[in-house]
Amino acid sequence: MKHLTEYRDKDLVHKLLGQIRAEVRREYVLMEVCGGQTHSFVRSGLVELLPDEVTLVHGPGCPVCVTPLEVIDRALKIAARPDVIFTSFGDMLRVPGSEADLFSVRAKGGDVRVVYSPLDAVRIAQENPDRQVVFFAIGFETTAPANAMSVVQAERLGLTNYSVLVSHACVPGAMRAILDAPGNRVQGFLAAGHVCAVMGYWEYPPIAEQYKVPIVVTGFEPVDLVRGVLAAVRQLNEGRAEVENAYQRIVSEPGNREAQKLVTEVFELGPRGWRGIGEIPDSGLHLRDAYADFDAVRRFDVGDIHSVESPVCIAGEILQGRKKPTECPAFGTECTPDHPLGATMVSSEGACAAYYRYHRPTVTVNG
C-alpha cells in the first residue's frame, strides 16, 4: 500500500531506534496526545523497544475517554425517550454511564442507531419528520467540521427535528492544563497528526515558547512515531523548544482553512469538563447562540444532570499521564473490555484497552 508500508518498515524502525539510543543522555518524559498513537506504540511493541531513558506517558488523547460522565448520562436520558432516534458513532455505545450504556438503552427498546457520518443523521431526520433525531457530536477538532456541517445542512433544509449533543474537546487547552498541573513531568509532546491536518499547528508555538517544551507533530505508523521521539529527544538535548512537523506528507502549518472557518461559524471556544480531570478553560467547542435551536441539551432540558465517577477507576490519573494502566488495581480483574469501569478501557483508542490487548513483556516491531 503506497505511503503506508514504507512507514511500517522494520529495518528503518530499528535504525531510528539506534539513533535514539545514540542520542539519549538522561531521562526523557514524552506524552503522545492521541489515543491512536498510544495504540500504535503499544501494538507495535515500541513501548518496550525504546531506551529505558525514554518514558512515554499516555495523555487525554481519546475523545471517547474524556467525554464527561454527565454527558454520557444526558445521552442515556435522551436516547431512552420514545420520541427520539439517537444516533452515534459506534465507539460510544459501550461507554459506561453511571448505571448503563447506550447498548443497554437499545436493548430496552430505545431507538439507538450507529451512523458513519453526522450527515447520515441529518438524512434520518429528513426521513422521520415525526421523530426527534439527535446526533452525539463528540471528538477533537478532527470531527468538528463534519459535525458543524450537519448543523448548517439541517438549518438549510429547515429541519426542526434535528439536534446535536455536543462534547467537542480542543487539544491546546488540554496541553496547557497538563503543563500547569502540580507535579507535571511532561518534557515534550508528540502532537496528533490528524488534528493538525485540520487545524494546522499555528496554535502550538506559544505553548512551546511559554513552557519550554518541544512539540513534534507526528503520524501513527511505527516509523512516524520513532521519528517523532527522535526529534523530541534531539530538541531536548539541544535545549530547544520548538514546534516541528514530522508528518509533512499530511500536515501543513495553516491546516485546512475552509474547515476551520466552518467550525468557527457554528462553534465557539469555551470551558469544558474532561472526564477524570475536571474543567479546563478554553478547551471545548460549544454551539453559538445563532445555532442554539440545534442544542440537544436545551431541547430536552438535561443540563442539570451531575454524575459521580467510580471510586475504583483511576482513568483520570492515566489520562493525565501520572500512572500507567497496569498500575490500576482493577486493571484486568474488575475492569476489562467486557466489563469496563471507565472509558479508557472500553474505547478503541483508550490507553487501558491498548494495554489489555497488546501489552506484553517481549515483542517485535511487527509482532
Image (cartoon, grey):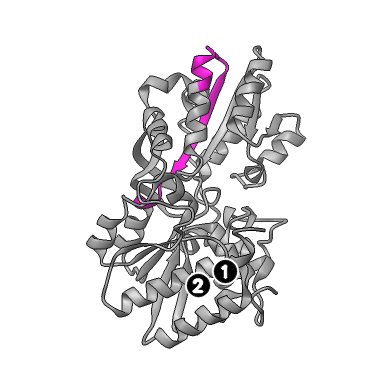
The image quadrant where one finds the C terminus is: bottom right
- Picture disc at residue 222: 1
Q: Position of residue 167 (x, y in %)?
A: 48, 39
Question: Residue at label 2?
Answer: 226
Looking at the picture, which amino acid does disc 1 mark?
Pro
Q: Please tell me which residue is depicted at 38% across the width and 76% down the height of the picture.
A: 233
In this rendering, position of residue 40 left or right of residue 260: right
Dot 1 crowding, Cα within 10 Å, few <14, some 14–19, many 20+: many
Q: Please tell me which residue is depicted at 67% across the width and 69% down the height of the picture.
A: 358
In this rendering, position of residue 152 left or right of residue 340: left
Q: Position of residue 47 (x, y in %)?
A: 55, 75
Q: Nearer the viewer, residue 156 or 311?
A: 156
Q: Position of residue 260 (x, y in %)?
A: 39, 37
Q: Please tell me which residue is depicted at 55% across the width and 72% down the height of the picture.
A: 327
Q: Position of residue 81 (x, y in %)?
A: 65, 24
Query: The residue tagged with tag 2: helix, strand or loop?
Result: helix
Measure how far apart labels 2 and 1 are at the Cα level: 6 Å
Q: Nearer the viewer, residue 90 or 228?
A: 228
Q: Please tell me which residue is depicted at 48% across the width and 56% down the height of the picture.
A: 249
Dot 2 crowding, Cα within 10 Å, few <14, some 14–19, many 20+: many
The reply to whether callout 2 and callout 1 are in contact (CB within 8 Å) is yes
Q: Quadrant of residue 176?
A: bottom left
Question: Magenta residues, as a range?
Answer: 153-173
Q: Is residue 270 above or below residue 31?
A: above
